[in-house]
């Protein structure tokens, strides 16, 4: 098990602080590249000095980002043999970790101010992806158990392989195939299951053409001739009918059927312009609690939308009730 976040801060060195990250985020003081390269020598190929004289990698190069992720997961979280099939979404580790730290604070608000830890806390990850990044980080940081659902067979096979390489994680994470593309929760959540929290990084774009055009704009801004995506992504990882708003609207409607079996539903929302419609839909659906949690990583701004259908008394009783734990 990795040491505490504080123990990972290099001694005697000054690293650039990543503005906006959660104070418990292991990566808030930047990356210790000498330590990362020592543990994962393949990363050395991609490390160079940037314009500020600091070690860095080219974040527009998907292979460099993947090599950095592999080293971070090994050094900071004790996760071995992490890899992704070519073209799959390669998640930025600090941002994904931030989501989980904010969720821990959200759960603490209904657990007397103390962050709940251990496998008793069950989380449902909608769209676990090829990287399985939320279960990996969530279990390492807080000991939570996870159910991860996924539409894509290739992504599910990749997540399964990562868990098989890390047996303690395999015992804490259950993966399920979603065979109904139009559903969010239906078809994967069993009748007797309860979850403390659900999480999701929804597809942003409304079509493949829209996703590709956005990629071309980013490359033009960077003055690069490439056409790839620096963090990868394909199919349902990037787009769905209605884009981010359409996906979240369907999630809100389906969440009503699980109103008494989930403490908090949550999702990332990339565009602030989508918030008014999402909040309106939540009020119409009868959500008793709606919270908007801002997130930032440097200049990138995002937010978490969280909602619950439980009254305060029911929520307090619910968190004390026994829950089913995966064997």
Image (spheres, rainbow, N blue to C red):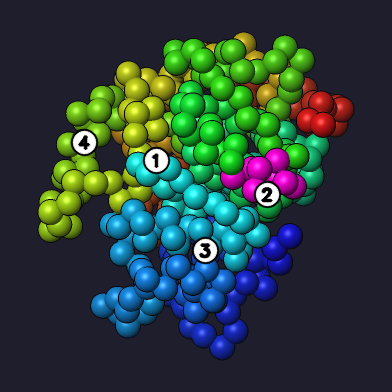
Secondary element at image label 4? helix
Nearer the camera: disc 2 or disc 3: 2
Say the numbered circle drawn on residue 106. none
Check the image and report above or below for 2 versus 292: below
Cα distance in 3D space between marks 4 and 1: 15 Å
Q: Which residue is mark 1?
A: 88
Asked if labels 1 and 2 touch by Cβ distance under 8 angstroms, the answer is no
Q: Which residue is mark 2?
A: 166
Secondary element at image label 3? helix
- Of callouts 2 and 3, the N-terminal one: 3
| Percent x, y of residue 147 | 65, 31
| Percent x, y of residue 167 | 72, 46
Q: Is residue 118 left or right of residue 72?
A: right
Q: Is residue 135 left or right of residue 237?
A: right
- Of callouts 4 and 2, the N-terminal one: 2
- Of callouts 3 and 4, the N-terminal one: 3
Range of the magenta residues? 162-170
Q: Main secondary structure of the magenta part?
A: helix
Q: Which residue is mark 4?
A: 212
Q: Which residue is mark 3?
A: 71
Cα distance in 3D space between marks 2 and 3: 15 Å
């Amino acid at each position: 098990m990795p040491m505490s976040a504080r123990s990972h801060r290099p001694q005697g060195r000054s690293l650039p602080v990543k503005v906006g990250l959660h104070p418990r985020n292991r990566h808030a003081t930047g990356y210790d590249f000498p330590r990362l390269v020592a543990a994962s020598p393949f990363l050395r190929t991609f490390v160079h000095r940037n314009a500020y004289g600091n070690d860095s990698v080219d974040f527009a190069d998907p292979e460099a980002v993947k090599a950095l992720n592999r080293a971070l997961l090994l050094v900071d979280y004790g996760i071995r043999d992490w890899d992704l099939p070519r073209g799959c979404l390669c998640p930025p580790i600090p941002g994904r970790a931030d989501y989980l730290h904010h969720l821990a604070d959200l759960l603490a608000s209904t657990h007397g101010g103390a962050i709940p830890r251990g496998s008793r806390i069950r989380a449902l990850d909608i769209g676990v992806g090829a990287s399985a990044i939320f279960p990996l980080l969530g279990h390492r940081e807080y000991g939570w158990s996870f159910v991860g659902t996924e539409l894509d067979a290739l992504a599910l096979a990749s997540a399964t392989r990562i868990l098989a390489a890390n047996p303690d994680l395999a015992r804490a994470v259950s993966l399920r195939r979603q065979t109904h593309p139009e559903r969010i929760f239906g078809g994967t959540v069993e009748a007797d299951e309860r979850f403390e929290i659900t999480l999701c990084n929804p597809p942003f774009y409304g079509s493949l053409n829209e996703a590709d055009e956005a990629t071309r704009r980013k490359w033009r801004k960077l003055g690069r001739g490439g056409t790839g995506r620096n963090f990868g992504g394909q199919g349902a990882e990037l787009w769905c009918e209605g884009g981010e708003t359409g996906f979240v609207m369907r999630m809100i409607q389906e969440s009503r059927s699980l109103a008494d079996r989930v403490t908090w539903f949550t999702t990332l929302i990339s565009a602030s312009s989508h918030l008014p419609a999402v909040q309106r839909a939540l009020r119409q659906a009868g959500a008793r609690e709606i919270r908007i949690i801002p997130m930032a990583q440097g200049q990138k701004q995002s937010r978490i939308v969280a909602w619950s259908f439980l009254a305060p008394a029911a929520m307090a009783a619910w968190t004390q009730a026994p829950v089913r734990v995966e064997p």
